[in-house]
Image: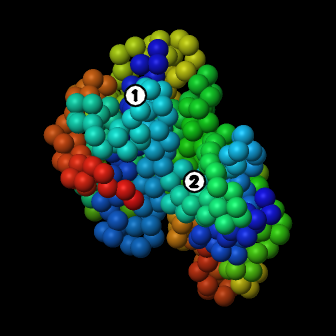
Amino acid sequence: MGWLHEIPDPEIPVISIVELGVIRDLHFNDTTLEVTITPTYSGCPAMKQMEDDVIKKLHEKGFDKVKINTVYDPAWTTDWLNEAARLKLQNYGIAPPEGTKDKSALLGEPKSVTCPRCKSKQSEMVSQFGSTACKALYKCKDCLEVFDYFKCI
Amino acid sequence: MNEILFKYLLRISDSGLILAQRISAWTGHGPFLEEDLALTNIALDLFGRSRSLLDYAGKLEGKGRSEDDLAFFRNERHFYNHLICEQPNGDYAQTMLRQAFVDAYELLLYTELSKSKDTTLAAIAAKSVKEITYHKRHSFSWVKRFGNGTEESFTRLQNAFHEIWPYTGDMFEPIEGEAELVKNGFVPDLQKIKADWEKEIKNLLQESNITLPENVYMHSGSAKALHSEHLGFILAEMQSLPRAYPDAKW
């Protein structure tokens, strides 16, 4: 698992794919190293890149036989991002998810997201859909900066 | 039973695939940048979901057909997508109203499918529910905005309604043998979904100032793979590359 920590998320290079929570399991089946991953969003184009990166990294480390298994259950959730990963996202300029327990996200009420630059709580949603499948677009009403918000799912 | 489940999987995956192909046509043509991105994101979710479903359908069929084989090497008469998914995009009001009808339907359907006795189908459905929640919030807010905006936006929504409404009944047509899947706890009864869907859509239309007409003729046929004239053109474009170069690899 340690080596996989060296693989950055293809879209958000400050966090690793392990921190992102997509690597669910690693084990040997006979002589084949099987890696179980779960997709963030069904159609996320970065998933293929992650699979290729995992295979490449493990080949470099001397594992010739590597197999990727994709599982859907349990479905990936932003709750799997740990505190360290959230902080890294924030320092990178992406507002981290504010927990799936916040049901206002599902009810469509506007909610305040902390601006990753000036830390103001006065922000508004510009679009529910952002630069990648996992993000929404927000704008800070204080520093006027537009920023990405990692959506809760 | 597997044969019926295979066809059922085609029905739900084809619907996502064809709608995704349709709304992808807005890429680079959206009314403004954020909407362009929104539709591209939604199309990606639908493509992704259909990939997972087609992959599973291929394995269930057991004839060695991959997700790509099923997407690119079947003809119109072997596609089971709902008629509403293949209807033209029209203007933005039409695209959004079609999306709202489909999103409301899918959220109800996939919520039920996430309780399916088929664990693979249930897992894919559970994942999809999270995504559809976002899609629906987006399309519903647009329909309400069109309905309560200007005279122009309302007229466009009203015209879109007349175009799209006659294709909504087809979503509730079961495939042959579906009752058996329902009986065994694999898939929900569409009649139950229909009651909830009608309630929700009535509210949406009321909030958007659209009056629901009675006794509208409803098109049907997709459960038997009978389609409107549009599907052939969609497939011709979508399938052209793999058919011209069958050995091409990404």
Q: What is the chain identity of the residue bearing mark 2?
A: A
Q: Which three-letter amino acid code belongs to the residue tagged 2?
A: Tyr
Q: Circle 2 is placed at which residue position?
A: A41
Judging depth in this view, the residue of B216 and B238 nearest the camera is B238
Judging depth in this view, the residue of A34 and B111 nearest the camera is A34
Residue B112 horizontal side relative to residue B2, left or right:
right
Q: What is the chain identity of the residue bearing mark 1?
A: B
Residue found 46% across the figure and 22% down from its top: B5
Q: Residues within 10 Å of mark 1 (few under 14, many from 20)?
A: few
Task: Single out the mark in the foreground, 1 or 2.
Answer: 1
Q: Is residue B237 above or below residue B229?
A: below
Q: CA distance from mark 1 to mark 2?
A: 28 Å
Q: Which mark is residue B63?
A: 1
Q: Circle 1 sits in a helix, a strand or a loop, which is it? A: loop
Q: Are marks 1 and 2 in contact (CB under 8 Å)?
A: no
Instruction: Report the number of discs.
Output: 2
Residue found 44% across the figure and 26% down from its top: B62
Q: Residues within 10 Å of mark 2 (few under 14, many from 20)?
A: many
Q: Which three-letter amino acid code belongs to the residue tagged 1?
A: Lys
Residue found 43% across the figure and 26% down from its top: B61
Q: Quadrant of residue A89?
A: bottom right
What x and y, as percent, mark residue A54?
64, 60
What x and y, as percent, mark residue B188?
52, 22
Judging depth in this view, the residue of A48 and B126 nearest the camera is A48
